[in-house]
Image: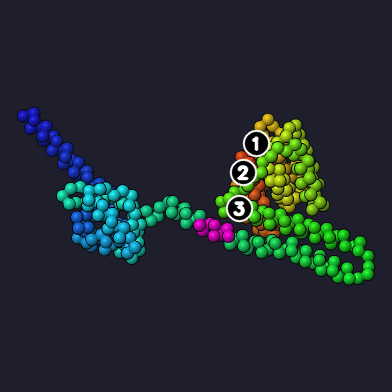
Amino acid sequence: MVIHHDRQDASGRMDQLNQLSTRTWQVSPDMLCYFHADGTFAHVNPAWEDTLGWSLEEMIGKPFSAFIHPDDVRGSEAAFALLTSGEPVLGFENRYRAKDEAYHRLSCVAVPEGDDRYFCSARDITGDHERVALVEEQEEEAELREQFLAVLGHDLRNPLAGLDSGIAIIERRSAQAGSQADLAPVLEQMRRSVTRMDELIRNMMDFARVRLGDGIGLDLAMQGDMGALLQQVCEEIAIGKPTAEINFISDADRVVRCDAPRIQQSLSNLLANAVTHGDMSHPVTVEYRTQPKHFVIAVRNAGGQISEQGRANLFQPFFRGTPDESKQGLGLGLYIVSQIVGAHGGKIDVVSENGETRFIMTIPG
């Protein structure tokens, strides 16, 4: 009698499991099906119609190859042959044709279940997040290339025009038998144009290296007087921007290890940003100090506050602030700074408040 009750209980549990399995079959978002040994569909769940649009009647009894993309038929038939030999097929991908003639890429797991029946679970991965992210990344890169080409022609044209005009003036006046003293301002403008053009090209080349995956190359060495090298940058920027007052403060008590030309380039870019966007009725201050394991370079200038959104995008390539700032350069300077600092294993912070903006590079070495 006890055994009879146990059998009844077991039978009841099996009925419950079967009912649960049936409900799972009906509501599962995964595409579930059974194949016959000849590759025809024995049964499909509603997810197939939800995904591909074919009704149960349109699929059952049809070979799976009737729905497969022509380029995927051979691989799919090889996978099915492996399945019918008794081996499971895991993570196999192929493309199924929907009723609207579009193709959906499916990722399939199939196992033999005996009696010449084979169970398959498939998932539509056409809109997979990784593929969407890849498409977005490619679109972004294409947009960056277009922006790059657009601004390159504009920003390199102006310095070159300055050179061309200056050379033309020198040529004309050299042919005259007059004094050459008034050529000094022309030569100074030419020198500024050359410097600006060199900065644009250098940033452009560094950007290309980063985007191509090579990264910013470093030549690390011990620098005994980094302060002098940084002060030299301040003097060069001041020559190019006579209206700017640049103060340099050094509080360094040890040598540092870094790529000095790259650090100079970073400071040059930060100072170029400061004298371009800052309020030049107030001085720009550069501070250099050493700490036990790091050295810090800070650039401080007066001017309008950078918005939170602006700070979030400052170090993105081609970011140039508001539309009225669109003629100030390629918008690569701060991006290159962030890449150089990152290559050193350091960080760069920006604080903009109370009418003052500070960029702070903290670099191990």
CA distance separating discs 2 and 1? 11 Å
Which residue is depicted at the point 13% across and 38% down? 11
The answer to whether residue 141 is magenta is yes
Which residues, given as a range, are shown in magenta? 138-145
Q: Residues within 10 Å of mark 3 (few under 14, many from 20)?
A: some
Left or right: where 143 falls relative to 300: left
CA distance separating discs 3 and 2? 13 Å
- Answer whether residue 156 is visible to the viewer in this image: yes
- Earlier sequence position, callout 3 versus callout 2: 3
Q: Of all residues shown, which one is farthest toward the left?
A: 1
Q: Amino acid at mark 1?
A: Pro
Which secondary structure is most common in the magenta stretch?
helix
Which mark is nearer the camera, 1 or 3?
3
Q: Residues within 10 Å of mark 1 (few under 14, many from 20)?
A: some
Q: Residues within 10 Å of mark 2 (few under 14, many from 20)?
A: some
- Earlier sequence position, callout 2 versus callout 1: 2
Q: Secondary structure at mark 2?
A: helix
Determine which of the numbered discs, if any, sits on residue 343 in the image. Answer: 2
Which residue is depicted at the point 80% across and 58% down? 191
Q: Quadrant of the N terminus?
A: top left
- Earlier sequence position, callout 1 versus callout 3: 3
Left or right: where 98 falls relative to 262: left
The residue labelled by disc 3 is: 209
CA distance separating discs 1 and 3? 23 Å
Determine which of the numbered discs, if any, sits on residue 364 in the image. Answer: 1
Left or right: where 204 falls relative to 99: right
Determine which of the numbered discs, if any, sits on residue 228 in the image. Answer: none
Residue 92 image position (x, y, % from top left): 32, 52
Q: Secondary structure at mark 1?
A: strand
The quarter of the displayed image where residue 365 is located? top right
Q: Amino acid at mark 2?
A: Ala
Residue 170 image position (x, y, % from top left): 85, 66
